[in-house]
Image (tube, rainbow, N blue to C red):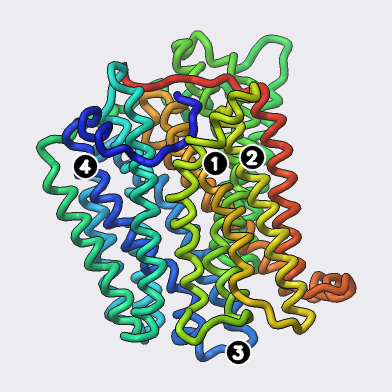
Amino acid sequence: MTTTAATAPDSRQLRVALPRQIPYIIATEGCERFSFYGMRNILTPFLVSTLLLYLPLGERGLAAKDVFHTFVIGVYFFPLLGGWIADRFWGKYRTVLWLSMVYVAGHACLALFDDNRSGFYAGLFLIALGSGGIKPLVSAFVGDQFDSSNKHRAKLVYDAFYWIINFGSFFASLLMPIFLRGFGPAIAFGIPGALMAIALWVFWLGRKRYVNVKPAPPNPHSLLRVARTALRARRPGQSRPGLWITGFGLVLALLSLAAIPHLGFVIGACLALGTLLVFGGIGTALQLERARGAHPDEAVDGVRDVLRVLVVFALVTPFWSLFDQKASTWVLQGAQMTKPAWFHEAQMQALNPLLVLILIPLNNAVLFPLMRRLGVEPTALRRMGTGIALAALAWVAAGALQLRLDGGEAVSIAWQILPYALLTLGEVLVSATGLEFAYSQAPPSMKGSIMSFWMLAVTFGNLWVLVADAGVRNNTVTGWIAASGVSENAFLMFFFAAFAAFAALAFALYARRYPMQDFYRA
């Protein structure tokens, strides 16, 4: 893969270099991202001001965060399902097409049931299923349009791809709070639904131009089969430590499921999945060489490549804990700040995509060339590790603002520009880089699935938010926070900053030994 930063798309290069089907995919992504961010960025204020009015005022903010982050967990969990269906049955094109119809139905539910919790939550589920199911496939579908003869152009497309995401997000973040306040939730949620319907139509129009990589047939040397062989294999005079570690993980997963009545379904189920992935991955890595002979060397090596990638993804999860709270925690903080009467605190989120549109070309034109002149190559892993550290700094800044608010000061919402700027620079370094990194590091038979694991990192990032919020509901924890002399909000902000700083350090140490791969189509 290339190691340069994402750049703003150059129109002349796009016309000359790109396959003719690429504009259909980019246009589809622009409309779909407007629809997603349009509803997502007004979800928290809508919940607080409308759907959760039955709760006491002091409980609405935390309840809105729970709903928001549970929804985001679903959005980034269902890529596992979409990737599996595409890789094994329907292929990427048909999976995107059919799940997009589910996506449109979910938007319709939001617009029709804005005053009915059951109907509204059903709409959120359908959007999570549709949006999550297609999310890894569109990125991987872009990569499928290239081969080894023009793979150097893929970076330009991923730049344009990420640029159009933020172009749609900017206008959605800016306009939807205005429509919510001026025209009500039915219109505010209906407009994103209309954009998603347009996205589906545009994607369908390009159907005869796409390169469609066929689903892989049942693979006797798949990741799970190789892992099972490795764990079960016996060697004379040797124990099976990997099998014991995996078994211990299975016990912990069952305990997490048993604790669902106390933890809640989302937390319990996600903890069970995470435990299986972590302990199963460690156990498989310990005994992987035992699978050689029963499976081809390339299959065993492919599993090792995937396990290495999953470690990278796991270390990125704290970044997503911080990033996604800009649409929940930072919106609630903005509601406490001084601002013009015409300005809605949710509109601050428009600053994020606007800064992305500025920072992407600035990084490539100024920052990264400067780093190279100083003898430091901005590799993909270096960019991602730096992005996690910048997110930690953003939350230190947000925590400092919260301390001023807790002290009774009148703080202008303009001060949120600083944490937004730091977090957005971190996003450019992590997210834009991660799309290409995930595709290039995935063995051919695992393209859709490995992109699903990249999305699953966001699920676990939001899981840590739910776990932390559940912790502050515990009397022992709240008593300890009160004794510290800071509010719960400020405490959580500094906690997540420390969480990301530790992850950035661990990421840097792991990245020094990571062997980069190149799995573009021959």
Q: CA distance from mark 1 to mark 4?
A: 25 Å
First in residue order: circle 1 vs circle 4: 4
Q: Is residue 411 left or right of residue 122?
A: right
Q: Is residue 118 visible?
A: yes
In the depicted view, which residue is nearer to us: 506 or 353? 353
Amino acid at pointer 3? Leu
Amino acid at pointer 4? Pro
The answer to whether the residues at label 1 and label 2 have Cβ atoms under 8 Å apart is yes
First in residue order: circle 4 vs circle 2: 4
Q: Quickly name the residue at label 4.
A: 23
Q: Is residue 87 visible?
A: no
Q: Quickly name the residue at label 3.
A: 57
The quarter of the rendered structure image containing the C terminus is: top left
Q: CA distance from mark 3 to mark 1?
A: 38 Å
Q: CA distance from mark 3 to mark 2?
A: 39 Å
Q: Quickly name the residue at label 2.
A: 386
The residue that appears at 77% across and 67% down in the rendered structure is 491
Disc 2 secondary structure class: helix
The residue that appears at 46% across and 43% down in the rendered structure is 360
Amino acid at pointer 2? Thr
Q: Is residue 332 left or right of residue 434?
A: right
Q: CA distance from mark 3 to mark 4?
A: 47 Å
First in residue order: circle 3 vs circle 2: 3
Packing grade of label 4 (10 A; few <14, some 14-19, many >=20) is some
Q: CA distance from mark 4 to mark 2?
A: 32 Å
